[in-house]
Each structure stands twice: as structure tokens, then as C-alpha cells.
Amino acid sequence: MKSETLKLDAIASHCTELAARAARHTDDKGNGVHPTEIAQLEFIRDDASSTVCSIYEPALAIIVQGKKKILLGEETYHYGAAQSLVVSVELPVRGFIVEATPDKPYLGVLLKLSPLQLCDIVAQVQPRTETKDGSCRGLFVSEMDLPLMDCALRLTQLLDTPQDIPFLAPMIIREIYYRLLTGEHGGAIRQIATSGSNMQRIASVIKLLKTDFTQSLRVEALAEQANMAASSFHRHFKAVTSMSPLQYQKQLRLLEARRLMLAEDTDATQAAYQVGYESPSQFSREYSRMFGAPPLQDIQQLRIA
């Protein structure tokens, strides 16, 4: 019991130091995701409750201050300080920062995951338990353990000694991969880098969907791309993403339409046609369902914010 208390105290201490470092490196940069001198490492900052809809790419996100919830399809995930979010395939997600103020902003440490780097070490790491190649959800939340928190802290400390980054950062990132592979969700992490795994086959289809999301969707063609029967493909796709291929495509279209209206001042009808909708009224209904307001009203609110 005493050793467990000491571990929790050490995790809390590391979390506090990581929050201080994230705050220092983002203090004059405003809200958003901020790159660092370590190519795969970024800091996240937001000083107010807000909503962010985007495509999450494979990454390890460690929350060090504040709280957030995200919606993946119909599923809701809550996480906060000393917890991590791991994303193994590209997923359209709606995120809501629910605890953040200017004095105590939401802060996180983000490490982009490279399947190639994972592949380099996965064969050398014995799995914690033998797992079948079922389909794991492409996103999960975990409590941070001390070894992984220690790795994250040492990696951010390298920003104070840039001359050490080229030599030491790859070794620490490699250790982080090792900790992920031997941790609670090691089986899901392993699938990212295992050739021919269901996760990797679904990931290849997701890349295709992202490239051609304006085109009519044929599940049979996607299943062929994944080298699966159509029924099996549909089941595995939903297991990984929590949504059907059609729902996934719909969210990609709506996110791109929102970007077109916000960043390029495209009107709603034109945005609808550009992302593949044939009916502007259907686009407006589905847009309102996803973002909580009709296109024009939503964009106006975003610009005011």
C-alpha cells in the first residue's frame, strides 16, 4: 500500500512538472497545438472551454492539466490530468475541453506515433499476453503509469538542451514505444505495426476514404482493398472506428465542408457540392446534427469565438 502511494505521488509530481513545462513553452503562443524542436513532440494548450472537431492522427496524448471529453461516433470518452489518450488510426473526432481557464489552461503533451518506428521494435518485444488478431478500437484512454510518465518528462527536458536532442530523443521515443507495447493496451499498439493485421488493413482503407471521400462509397470495393469479405470488413471497420464506413465518410465530408466555409469563405451550398453532397438540404440537416447548428449559424459562432 505504501509503495502504491509513493508511485501515485511520483506520477502527480511528474504531471505537475510536465504542466509547468507545457505552460512555459506555450505561454506566448496562444491556444492550439504547438510544435517543438523534437519533430514528433508537440504541446497542446487551451485557456477556455471550447469545441474542436478534427481528424485525430496516430498519437499518444498525455493530459497534464484540465479535462476533456471526446465523441467518437456514438461513444464518449472522458479524460484529465495524469491520463493518456492513444489513437492508432486516423479518426474523425469531436472534442470538448470542459475544464480550462486563462489562469489554469488545459495542457497536454502530444507524441505522434510512427508505425515504421513501432515496426522496428515490435518483433523484439514479447507481448504481455497472447492476443488473437481481433479488431481493437482505434482509440483508448488509460491511466498513466510511472515509467511512461518518466519517459515523457525526460523527453520534454531535452528541449532545455537542444544539442542533446538528435542523440537522446530517438532513444527516449523508442523507450516510450516499448512502454506502450508492454502496457495494458499493448495488443492494440502492436496491431498498428503488424503487417496484415486487421488494424493495419482498416488503416489502409481509411487512407483511401480520406483521399476519395467526395465519391460515392462502395463497401464491396473497400472490402476488396482490405482483402476481406464485405460482411467481415464492415464488422472490423466498426470495431476499429465505432462507426460504419458510410458514417465515417459522412464525418469526413462535414469536417471538410466546415473548413471550406470557415477558411475559404465558401457558401454552404457550394461547400455541400464540393464535398460530395447532391442535396443541400440533406447537407444542412446532417451538418446541424453533427455540429449542433445550421452551417451559417455555426460558422458565424466560430468566427466570433
Image (cartoon, grey):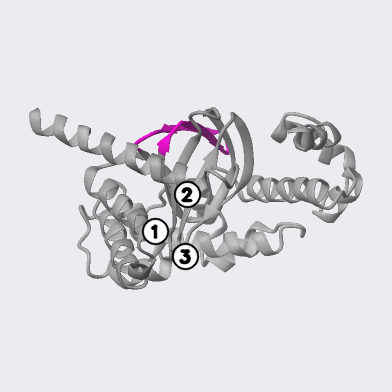
Return the mark for residue 25: 2
Magenta region, main secondary structure? strand
Which residue lies under the disc numbered 3?
Answer: 39
Count of residue discs: 3
Spatial separation of the CA atoms under disc 2 and disc 1: 9 Å
- Residue 234: horizontal and vertical position, in percent? 55, 51
Instruction: Give me the disc on residue 159.
Output: 1
Q: Is 76 covered by the magenta stretch?
A: yes
Note whether residue 108 is visible.
no
Query: Residue 130 falls in which quadrant of the image?
Result: bottom left
Q: Position of residue 172 (x, y in %)?
A: 29, 62
**Residue 109 x %, y %:** 43, 48
Residue 60 on the magenta span: no
For the N terminus, the image quarter is top left
Q: Is residue 90 above or below residue 80?
A: below
Report whether 297 appears left or right of 30.
right
Please say if the residues under marks 2 and 1 sit with CB atoms less than 8 Å apart. yes
Residue at x 28% of width, y 53% of height? 151
- Which residues lie in the magenta part? 64-82
Q: Which numbered disc, 3 or 2, marks the residue that appears first in the sequence?
A: 2
Q: Nearer the viewer, mark 3 or mark 2?
A: 2
Q: Nearer the viewer, mark 3 or mark 1?
A: 1
Helix, strand or loop under label 2: helix
Residue at (8% x, 29% y) in the render: 2
Say which residue appears at 39% left-offset and 66% top-offset.
Answer: 162
Earlier residue among tags 2 and 1 = 2
Q: Report the Cα–Cα distance between label 3 and label 2.
A: 15 Å
Image quarter in which the C terminus is found: top right
Q: Nearer the viewer, residue 181 or 236?
A: 181
Identify which amino acid the numbered label 1 is placed on.
Leu
Q: Which residue type does callout 3 highlight?
A: Ala
